[in-house]
Amino acid sequence: MNKLVLIFFLIGITLPSMAQVKKQKRTSRLSKELGLTQITDSVGKSGKKLAKIEDYIIISHTNDTTYVDTTLSIQKEYKFNYLRKDNFGLMPFSNLGQTYNSLTYNFQNTSLMPSFGARAKHFNYMEIEDINYYRVPTPLTELFFKTAFEQGQLADSFFTVNTSPQFNFSLAYKGLRSLGKYQHILTSTGNFRFTTNYQTKNKRYNARAHIVMQDLMNQENGGLQDDNVQYFETGEEEFLDRSILEVNFQNAESMLRGKRFHLDHNYKIIKKKDSLSKNKLSVGHIISFEDKYYQYDQSNAQTNSFGTAFKSSKLQERVTLENFYNQINLNYSNNIVGDLQFNVSANNYNYGYNKLVGLNGNVITNRLKGSIYSAGGKYHKQYKSFDLQGEVGMNVSGDFDGNFLKADATFKLNKDITAIASVNHSSKAPNYNFLLYQSNYINYNWQTNFNNTETEQIAFQLKSNKIANISVDYTTINDYTYFKKDEATSLVKPFQNSGTINYLRVKLEKEIKVGKFALNNTVLYQNVKDADSTLNVPEITTRNTLYFASHLFKKAMYLQTGVTLNYFTKYNMNAYDPVLAEFYVQTEKEFGDFPRLDFFINAKIRQTRIFFKAEHFNSALTGYNYYSAPNNPYRDFTIRFGIVWNFFL
């Protein structure tokens, strides 16, 4: 992994140098074809025909576009982490690359198929919607680096180039290795991405494709032993060396590995020639193949933690999923009617194990295998300040029933205020590991026949720079599936809540600026009505950042420094099960009600952003009662730094 990280760093540095000879000719040609003019900006020097920063385009999987952003803002501070996105509502574990405990949930869903299990390992698993495509007038490189915990580092290297205005490709690799402060929690992860997009000169045919290969490895220790929790909480000096605290075991390892090949292409049968044209017609095809597995290895059975096992040593279990997806869609656009799509799709799935299990006279099958055929459609219409979008889907054949309906209406009241209302209905089978699971541990073997989980959500958003960003959503959930310890065996099993859960969320985001000082606030209120206490979240979650930002040294550097407070109220926090790589419900003890204070100093010099942070600097002052999950403490005070560096050729 470290070699691959080094290779990509070298690519980012050497490719621009190798291309320097052809720079002037290529830039001139691309500038002419892209319609660029003489400018002066952060990308180049005055007096030359250069690309603007807005011409370095990022394209999402839904074909939304934005451009490369080299600015330094408070949002960049929030995204400078392992996931490289704002992790508000997630509680990290002590080591980088471990899982996150969820402090909030969004049940909006447009999936018709069960998801693969081991959800606790999927926070850094890049799905189709996480992959972007690019169109750049000159080669672009981005290097990301951040220190880890004890003998490790996090690096993400990215390079993209347009070989012509029609063809682009990108290469990227994110690698992590971190030993951690506690015993046996080493993490080693890698995410390789290759993307390409192409369009013909007449723009009738467009294609986007990606290849993603990922491996996420974690050593598992089961958390602190119960009798060692008190040593952590006392804060005595001898126990501040966390490596001497006893954990439940030191002989287990989990791995999530997957590869995906994805192609989305379309052909315009009737092309819109100018602004007066009324009709467009195109046909599209999406094909995607994903092969992934989750594996849990343990050298000796831990019967105290997971119950009796079929064998006492060399425990190894692997569950695989092969999913082959095909969709054909027909798209029609009209100036009056709007944009319409009709699609049909086929999902061929193969989930399971390579053995049968006999238990208590019953045989647990080894495979869930078959094909699902679906139909659906999309609609979009924009008229003046009003924007309407809708999407619907239904399984029409196969072993899994499923359907969804999603509709959004957006209205721009004025230049500052935008209102968005949405509804979402979903009926989907529980994840595969609720339906079928096999393990060397006898308790972790089941084959169930759970009902579909039904969700109904209504949501409203108000976006305003002057007032605030306010979002409210209300969800009803029926037949919710969850993991919990069985009262008879005290071991984790899957369950289904036959009642109705009512879930309300209200979120407010507002930044207040006074001169060069600012106070950025994000506050989330949650209320759950659940008779069985199966969906547990804190009532209040908040993040508040007080910071100073200003240009220095004749605007040669932009400085940003301040303090961030993270806090959530006490609640029955979910516990973590390493065999399943899932969180399970516990109602024995509440966790939370501890502040986390981070001090940061960030700076921007040209296209380079430098980040320095003293994380959780109040840990010794406010008490050692901070946990990411029961028996899994959060991080102590530590100092970390990193850099994001963009190169434009």
Image: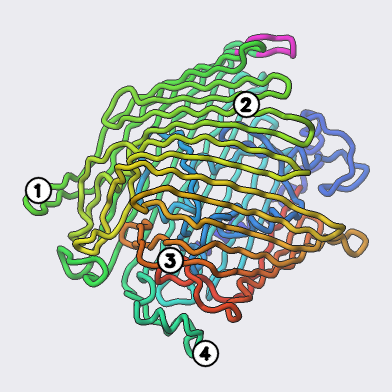
Considering every residue shown, the one lying at the far bottom of the view is: 238
Range drawn in magenta: 272-280
- Judge depth for marks 2 and 3 and give the one in front: 3
Q: CA distance from mark 2 to mark 3?
A: 55 Å
Which of the numbered marks, if any, corresponds to residue 362?
1
Query: Taking 456 as reference, is 33 left or right?
Result: right
Q: Earlier in the sequence, mark 1 or mark 2?
A: 2
Amino acid identity at mark 3: Glu
Residue 465 falls in which quadrant of the image? Answer: top right
Task: State how the image is colored.
Answer: rainbow
Coordinates of residue 364 in the picture (x, y in percent): 15, 47
What residue do we see at 60% from left, 43% from top?
Answer: 170
What secondary structure is found at the residue carrying circle 2?
strand
Magenta: main secondary structure equals loop
Residue 469 shows up from this direction: yes
Coordinates of residue 406 in the picture (x, y in percent): 50, 29
Which of the numbered marks, if any, corresponds to residue 590?
3
Query: Could you say which is closer to the camera, residue 79 or residue 349?
Result: 79
What residue do we see at 48% from left, 36% from top?
Answer: 457
Classify 10 Å Cα crowding around label 1: few (below 14), some (14-19), many (20 and above).
few
Amino acid identity at mark 4: Glu
Coordinates of residue 588 in the picture (x, y in percent): 35, 66
Residue 323 shows up from this direction: no
What residue do we see at 61% from left, 72% from top?
Answer: 616
